[in-house]
């Protein structure tokens, strides 16, 4: 699906299920794409529990940029594109998320998009070596339940359990969560499966 925003086009790769229970919209990190191992693992784990999954390539990556630039513009574009995706699935409750920078966007915009929850993969708590520049406030300000899945060796840091609804720390993993990405998928599917209510008949 091609989506037009005020800050350029975006693209969503959508995997649907026959009897969907919720919509999960995911996005990449600053220099990444929608085929990151952890994003694919989450998709593969969530489809069997009734999640229709959209993996979004944001406008800045469509332009070839490796950094998002203005957070204000990034959040505006994200809010627009999620609204367009939701227009095709109006009956499904929304969870949004992403890895690294994408997790930050999901936290910052949850209240604007109407998301019921956020999945934050490898949330970059601080720049490497700069723990005094904590971004924990973005987790706390999401306004909805947040699942954080982090690698114990992540140089961007691991949030405190108190800063999220649930924190899962994967032993041996770094920021890319690619040693055994299925573990990230399992953590997300378990959390979403437990909190997803059946749709009304």
Image: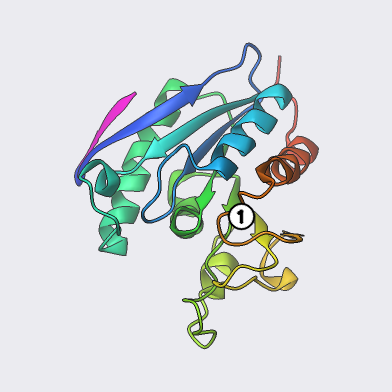
Residue 62 occupies quadrant: top left
193 falls in the magenta region: no
Q: For the stretch drawn in magenta, what is the main secondary structure?
A: strand
Q: Residue at x 61, y 55 (%)?
A: 144
Residue sitting nearer the eye, 127 or 97: 127
In the displayed orientation, state which residue is furthest to the top.
18
Figure colour scheme: rainbow
Q: Quadrant of the C terminus?
A: top right
Q: Give the magenta range.
A: 1-5
Residue 169: percent from left, percent from top:
74, 61
Q: Is residue 19 above or below residue 132?
A: above
Q: Is residue 174 above or below residue 17?
A: below
Residue 151: percent from left, percent from top:
67, 61
Report helix, strand or loop for mark 1: loop
Q: Residue at x 40, y 49 (%)?
A: 32
Residue 189: percent from left, percent from top:
72, 38
Looking at the image, can residue 199 be seen?
A: no
Q: Is residue 150 above or below residue 11?
A: below
Q: Is residue 158 above or below residue 129?
A: above
Q: Circle 1 sits on which residue?
A: 144
Looking at the image, can residue 99 be seen?
A: yes
């Amino acid at each position: 699906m091609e989506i037009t925003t005020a800050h350029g086009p975006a693209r969503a790769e959508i995997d649907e299920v026959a009897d969907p229970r919720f919509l999960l919209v995911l996005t990449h990190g600053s220099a990444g794409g929608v085929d990151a191992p952890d994003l694919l693992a989450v998709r593969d784990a969530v489809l069997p529990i009734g999640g229709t999954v959209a993996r979004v390539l944001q406008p800045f990556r469509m332009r070839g940029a490796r950094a998002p630039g203005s957070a204000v513009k990034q959040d505006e574009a994200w809010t627009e594109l999620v609204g367009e995706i939701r227009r095709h699935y109006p009956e499904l409750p929304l969870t949004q998320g992403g890895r690294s920078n994408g997790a930050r966007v999901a936290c910052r915009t949850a209240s604007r998009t109407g998301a019921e929850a956020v999945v934050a993969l490898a949330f970059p708590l601080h720049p490497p070596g700069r723990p005094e520049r904590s971004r924990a406030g973005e987790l706390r300000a999401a306004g909805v339940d947040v699942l954080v899945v982090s690698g114990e060796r992540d140089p961007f840091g691991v949030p405190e359990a108190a800063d999220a609804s649930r924190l899962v720390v994967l032993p041996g993993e770094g920021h890319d969560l690619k040693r055994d990405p299925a573990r990230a998928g399992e953590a997300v599917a378990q959390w979403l499966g437990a909190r997803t209510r059946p749709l009304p008949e």
